[in-house]
Image (spheres, rainbow, N blue to C red):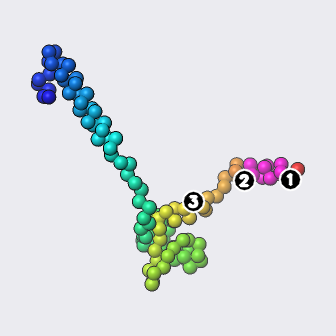
Amino acid sequence: MDANEINFENLPKAVAHLANEIAEIKSIVEQKQVPTISTKKIPIDISEACKIIGKAKPTIYTLVRERKIPCYKSGKKLYFFEDELLDWISKGRKKTLQEIEAEAKANYKNLK
């Protein structure tokens, strides 16, 4: 239905046409599947790891040598996984003073 065809006499037709269009759009949206997150892990090299962590290459090599950072080695090349690096960063979280005080109070109450 064209916008020029809409007038008072054919208003019910226009509304019916719009209702059909909305129904078609709704069915298309409902049929669309939710995008799946890839569970496939893609390795990254040391340059990308430096960008993610925000450290220089020598620092990364030191962390690898001290076995403080998760990594994989194939031949002479190091590989990392982004999710493992982010998890490693989050595990290094320092507690706030309020959290330390709350733990100390809870432990003190348990000792009594």
Where does the image place residue 26, in percent across and percent down from the top left? 31, 36
Sequence-wise, the earlier of marks 3 and 1 is 3
Residue 61: within the magenta? no
Q: Which residue is the site of mark 3?
A: 90
Q: Which mark is residue 100?
A: 2
Amino acid at circle 2? Ile
Sequence-wise, the earlier of marks 2 and 1 is 2
Q: CA distance from mark 2 to mark 3?
A: 18 Å
Snapshot quadrant of residue 39: bottom left
Amino acid at circle 1? Leu
Q: Is residue 96 above or below residue 42?
A: above
Where does the image place residue 94, in percent across and percent down from the top left? 64, 58
Residue drawn at (46%, 77%) of the image: 78
Q: Which residues are magenta?
A: 102-111
Q: Which residue is the site of mark 1?
A: 111
Q: Nearer the viewer, mark 2 or mark 3?
A: 3
Q: Nearer the viewer, mark 2 or mark 1?
A: 1
